[in-house]
Image: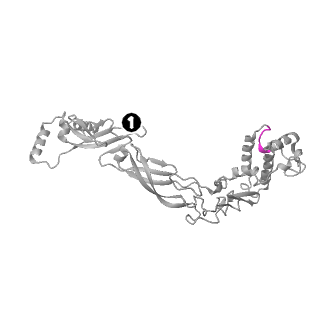
Amino acid sequence: MAKADFYELLGVSKTADEKELKSAFRKMAMKYHPDKNPDDKEAEKKFKEINEAYETLKDPQKRAAYDRFGHAAFEQGGMGGGGPFGGGGQGFGQGGFSDIFEDIFGEMMGGGRGRRPSGGRERGADLRYNMEISLEEAYAGKTAQIRVPTTISCDVCNGSGAKPGTKPTTCPTCQGAGRVRAAQGFFSIERTCPTCQGRGQTITDPCTKCHGHGRIQEERSLSVNIPAGIEDGTRIRLTGEGEAGLRGGPAGDLYIFMSVKPHQFFQREGADLYCSVPVSMTTAALGGKFDVTTLDGTKSRVTIPEGTQTGKQFRLKGKGMPIMRSNQTGDLYIQIMIETPQKLTKRQRELLQEFEQISSKENNPESSGFFAKMKEFFE
């Protein structure tokens, strides 16, 4: 039976470049792979055919011979035999098709090749530290000293994990690759080396201080610069201040998560501050002045006109929070809250009743207007 044309098998034209060939092969291999077509002999046969087609066309010399002579170019022993181009054939686990095999089916098996760094060097873990500061500290900024429990490189073996005078040796099982391959029927599977756990090296005489880990537990004291204007939830990263890496690997990072404690008088919204100030009924009615102490410790005078209502805001420009990485500053908003008199004396009550009797709609336009509109609405 005549063999199918390799270009037709892959569904590409004779002018297809390497990228098109690879893309077409990936698509066809996914479709006819035995794992997706169990007990389907036709699919298995098709899978072998497209593999043969790709192995031929991806090689410039083999492709040139195929374009000129067709399948006859490989009839003297086949792709892996003694034909003029047969000696270059490669099987699973030796590069060639196995590279793209891992590229495609690594996803089906739960991840790619993901080799560990040579020599077992692994990056240390990142650490998190939660820090709470006051609003005043967030306003001014500060330099804080913190103590962080972490791991550092062993000073006896210099992080190698091996006893001084000795050194790690290449793993005899994986020859330093950290991965081993095992045949599984039609194809091969690559796994983490069980001897060295993927590090590529073994330690026969471990360091007595770190027991072969290359690092030890220790509490470190660090200085942290907190910039002025920092906001609640901000994350500060200290590069290389996390856990030490394994066997001389790079250290991880330390992430400091900032939280700002609620303030007794000020509420923050971005760079602006808000403060509710109670004033007496008479001050609101007649007008007056009062001083407000801001976060920088200075006092600012607020003047309120007569007839000021509850909820009225007064803006103090530039008295808010600093804006990080700029020379700008937010504003402070003073919100008036009118306080109703309590525990009135008999005379005070008489005066208020007299005032109520002589009051007109002009004295209380909001309340008069509200009830008039409500009455009109329901009628």
> Which is nearer the eye, 135 or 122?
122
Which residue is tagged 1? 328
Which of the 4 image quadrants contains residue 326?
A: top left
Q: Position of residue 329 (x, y in %)?
A: 37, 37
Q: Position of residue 80 (x, y in %)?
A: 84, 52
Q: Position of residue 27 (x, y in %)?
A: 72, 46
Q: Could you tell me which residue is drawn at 74 percent across and 49 percent down?
A: 29
Element assignment for label 1: loop
Q: Could you tell me which residue is drawn at 83 percent across and 44 percent down?
A: 62
Left or right: residue 41 versus residue 146 is: right
Left or right: residue 71 versus residue 326 is: right
Q: Which residues are magenta?
A: 9-14
In the image, is residue 73 part of the stretch drawn in magenta?
no
Left or right: residue 168 versus residue 37 is: left
Residue 379 seen in the current view: no
Q: Position of residue 3 (x, y in %)?
A: 86, 47
Which of the 4 image quadrants contains residue 377?
A: top left
Q: Main secondary structure of the magenta part?
A: loop
Direction left: furthest residue: 347
Image quadrant for the C terminus?
top left
Direction right: furthest residue: 76
> Which is nearer the eye, 226 or 337?
226
Q: Please name the amino acid that badge 1 sits on.
A: Gln
Which scheme is used to colour this image of the protein? one colour
